[in-house]
Image (spheres, rainbow, N blue to C red):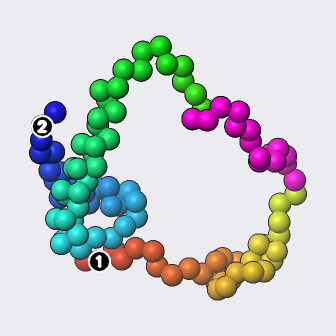
Amino acid sequence: MTDQPQRLTEDEVRRVATLCRVGLSDDEVESLRDEMAGLIAEVSVLKSIDTTGVEPTSHAVEGVRSVMRDDTPRAALTVADVLSNAPRREGDYFRVPAVMDHGEG
């Protein structure tokens, strides 16, 4: 393993940001290139751990039980019921603010 993690490209950072639905300025992309490379280097240490003979588990703690109710089918809510507490609506839809600025390009 090298002391200095390999820097991510601008395209790699922008691709991750797009997948996360996060808009980034050029300055933020530049700053995240090193930060993300450092995170990847830290997590890659897990590759060196020998897990031979370790049984896979669904929970890290023994004796965990689900507190969720059974998933049983039931009648769907009406549109009026679903939208009854909506802070903003447009016809039969929720009205929400824009999540991501698509910008020019």
Q: Is residue 62 left or right of residue 27?
A: right
The image quarter containing residue 88 is bottom right
Would residue 105 be visible to someone looking at this image?
no
The segment highlighted magenta reads: 60-74
Give neighbour class at mark 1: few <14, some 14-19, many 20+ (Cα, 10 Å): few
Residue 94, relative to residue 60: is it above or below? below
Mark 2 residue element = loop
The mark nearer the N terminus, 2 or 1, is: 2
Q: Nearer the viewer, mark 2 or mark 1?
A: 2
Would you say residue 72 sits in the magenta stretch? yes
User: Residue 10's spot in the image, x, y percent?
Assistant: 17, 58
Give me the residue at 29% from left, 77% from top. Answer: 103
Q: Residue at x 34, y 61 (%)?
A: 18
What separation in Å lies between label 2 and label 1 (alpha carbons)? 38 Å
Q: Please tell me whether residue 51 is drawn above or below residue 81 in the rendered image.
A: above
From the viewer's perspective, is 100 left or right of 96?
Answer: left
Please give the residue where the numbered disc 2 appears in the rendered image: 2
Task: Determine the image quadrant of residue 13.
Answer: bottom left
In which quadrant will I find the N terminus?
A: top left
Q: Residues within 10 Å of mark 2 (few under 14, many from 20)?
A: few
Q: Quadrant of residue 22?
A: bottom left
Q: Measuring 16% from the left and 65% from the top, which residue is drawn there?
A: 30
State the predominant SS element of the stretch in magenta: loop
Q: Position of residue 20 (x, y in %)?
A: 40, 60
> Pointer 1: what residue?
103
Q: Quadrant of the image for the C terminus?
A: bottom left
The label number, if any, that marks residue 24 in the structure image: none
Residue 96, horizontal then vertical, whole percent: 56, 79
- Type of amino acid under label 1: Gly
Where 51 falls versus 77 (above or below)?
above
In this rendering, position of residue 99 left or right of residue 9: right
